[in-house]
Amino acid sequence: MYEMCVGPEKPGGALVWHVMAKQAAATLCGQQLRQRVAATDGERARHCPDCMASFEKLMATTPC
């Protein structure tokens, strides 16, 4: 299961929507979000391209 969470694209960068597996310590792009940002703060944020690429690959793989 995955969730979307708002955080900086890189430390100190603009806010983006990241993809994070439930119970994970880092987003799919490897960012460790130190604090949660309210979703309302990211209403107009774009999606993290690295997270979305990783998520696309995960969804395209077939289960064994």
Image (cartoon, grey):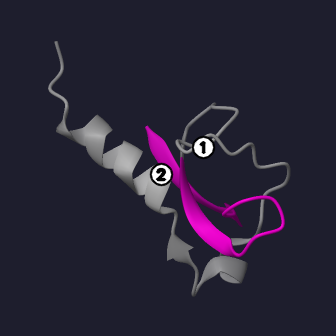
Residue drawn 45% across the image and 61% down it:
49
Name the image quarter holding residue 10. Answer: bottom right
Residue most extreme to the top: 64
Asked if the residues shown at circle 1 and circle 2 are in contact, with their CB atoms under 8 angstroms apart, the answer is yes
Name the image quarter holding residue 54. Answer: top left
Q: Element under label 2?
A: helix
In front of the other: 62 or 40: 62
Residue drawn 85% across the image and 48% down it:
34
Residue drawn 56% across the image and 66% down it:
17
Residue drawn 65% across the image and 78% down it:
42
The three-letter code of the residue at mark 2 reads: Cys
The three-letter code of the residue at mark 1 reads: Thr
Local crowd at mark 1 within 10 Å, few (<14), some, or many (≥20)?
many
In magenta segment, residue 2: yes
Q: Is residue 35 left or right of residue 44?
A: right
In magenta segment, residue 18: yes
In front of the other: 56 or 41: 56
Q: Is residue 11 left or right of residue 42?
A: right
Name the residue carrying label 1.
27
Distance in Å between CA atoms under marks 1 and 2: 7 Å
The majority secondary structure of the magenta stretch comes to strand
Q: Is residue 18 above or below residue 28?
A: below
Q: What segment is highlighted magenta in the picture?
A: 1-19
Q: Element under label 1?
A: loop
The quadrant of the image that shows the N terminus is: top left
What label does residue 51 carry, if any?
Answer: 2
